[in-house]
């Protein structure tokens, strides 16, 4: 069963085509990483899939009940505490105060936020802690699908790894499906069940490659070996590190 299906997606900015003929699916319980060079349209495709942006052409089919999205910028409200930021989306959903408190506590525990962290404002939190709050905010709505739009790009190496581990553990066991946008092939190989490669100019999916085993059991050496083999021997990964600042992501 498919959790997300994109069929013939096309999009343009100011008359310039940035996506054309994109077909992609994500199965239930599967995390698919979408990679490609900066500016090829990965984030635009994710926004279309989440219906934050309307496609010029094609069809988006959702096979899930509820989704959440985690952005590169945590986008926390600076005037609200960590708990207040999580609570905001729950109030929008119409939950009672008691239900909101329970959801906040559960989501905070999932991302290893301590009770004292919940009372802090974003300015009092490190970059990694702010991203934990953003992830907790997404989990609090109890989605069965999450869109990850390059959520760890701005973090240093150690923090990025901790956040990757958090995603792996959160999505373990097939309870969540997701589309993970990244330009980092090693990150994709750690987190995903399958990696899809977007064409340099957004003209379709060049192909996809499955990864063996559960991400929880994937060793660093296995990830390193897979990435080395892919970049040396698989032509679909040839241009994923190209950069064109003139393109819109």
Image: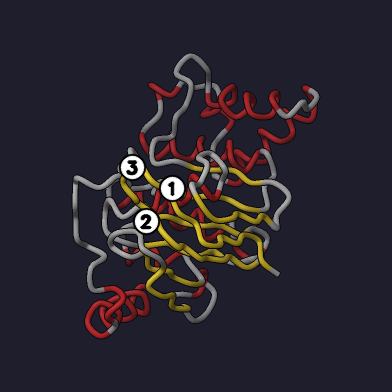
Q: Which residue position is annotated with label 3?
A: 15
**Badge 2 local density, few (<14 within 10 Å), some, or many (20+)?**
many
Sequence-earlier tag: 2 or 3: 3
Look at 43% across and 70% down and name the residue there: 195
* Quadrant location, the N terminus: bottom right
Q: Secondary structure at mark 3?
A: loop
Q: Secondary structure at mark 2?
A: loop
160 and 76: which is toward the camera: 76
**Badge 1 local density, few (<14 within 10 Å), some, or many (20+)?**
many
Disc 2 versus disc 3: distance between alpha carbons?
Answer: 26 Å
How many dots with numbers? 3
Q: Which residue position is annotated with label 2?
A: 182
Q: Which residue position is annotated with label 1?
A: 149
Is there a contact, CB below 8 Å, between mark 3 and mark 1? no
**Badge 3 local density, few (<14 within 10 Å), some, or many (20+)?**
few
Q: Is residue 2 left or right of residue 183?
A: right
The residue lying furthest to the front in this view is: 15
Look at 26% across and 79% down and name the residue there: 228
Name above or below for residue 236 compared with residue 164.
Answer: below
Look at 60% across and 46% down and name the residue there: 110
Name above or below for residue 227 compared with residue 56.
Answer: below
Q: Mark 3 or mark 1: which is in front? A: 3
Residue 213 placed where, x, y %? 52, 79
Residue 123 placed where, x, y %? 38, 21
34 and 110: which is toward the camera: 34
Disc 3 versus disc 1: distance between alpha carbons?
Answer: 25 Å
Q: Is residue 33 left or right of residue 30?
A: left
């Amino acid at each position: 069963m498919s959790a997300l299906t994109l069929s013939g997606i096309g999009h343009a900015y100011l008359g310039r085509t940035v996506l054309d003929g994109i077909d992609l699916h994500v199965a239930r319980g599967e995390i698919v990483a979408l990679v490609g060079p900066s500016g090829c349209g990965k984030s635009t495709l994710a926004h279309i899939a989440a219906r934050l942006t309307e496609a010029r052409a094609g069809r988006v089919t959702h096979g899930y009940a509820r989704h959440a999205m985690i952005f590169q910028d945590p986008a926390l409200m600076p005037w609200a505490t960590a708990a207040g930021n999580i609570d905001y989306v729950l109030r929008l959903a119409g939950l009672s105060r008691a239900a909101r408190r329970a959801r906040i506590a559960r989501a905070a525990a999932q991302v290893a936020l301590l009770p004292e962290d919940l009372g802090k404002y974003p300015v009092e939190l490190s970059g990694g802690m702010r991203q934990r709050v953003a992830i907790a905010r997404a989990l609090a709505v109890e989605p069965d699908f999450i869109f990850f739009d390059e959520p760890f790009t701005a973090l240093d190496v150690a923090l990025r790894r901790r956040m990757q581990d958090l995603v792996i553990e959160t999505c373990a066991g097939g309870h969540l499906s997701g589309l993970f946008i990244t330009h980092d092939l090693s990150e994709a190989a750690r987190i995903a069940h399958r990696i899809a490669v977007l064409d340099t100019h957004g003209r379709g999916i060049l192909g996809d490659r499955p990864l063996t085993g559960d991400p929880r059991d994937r060793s660093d050496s296995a990830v390193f070996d897979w990435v080395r083999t892919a970049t040396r021997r698989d032509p679909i990964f040839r241009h994923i590190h190209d950069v064109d600042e003139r393109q819109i992501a």
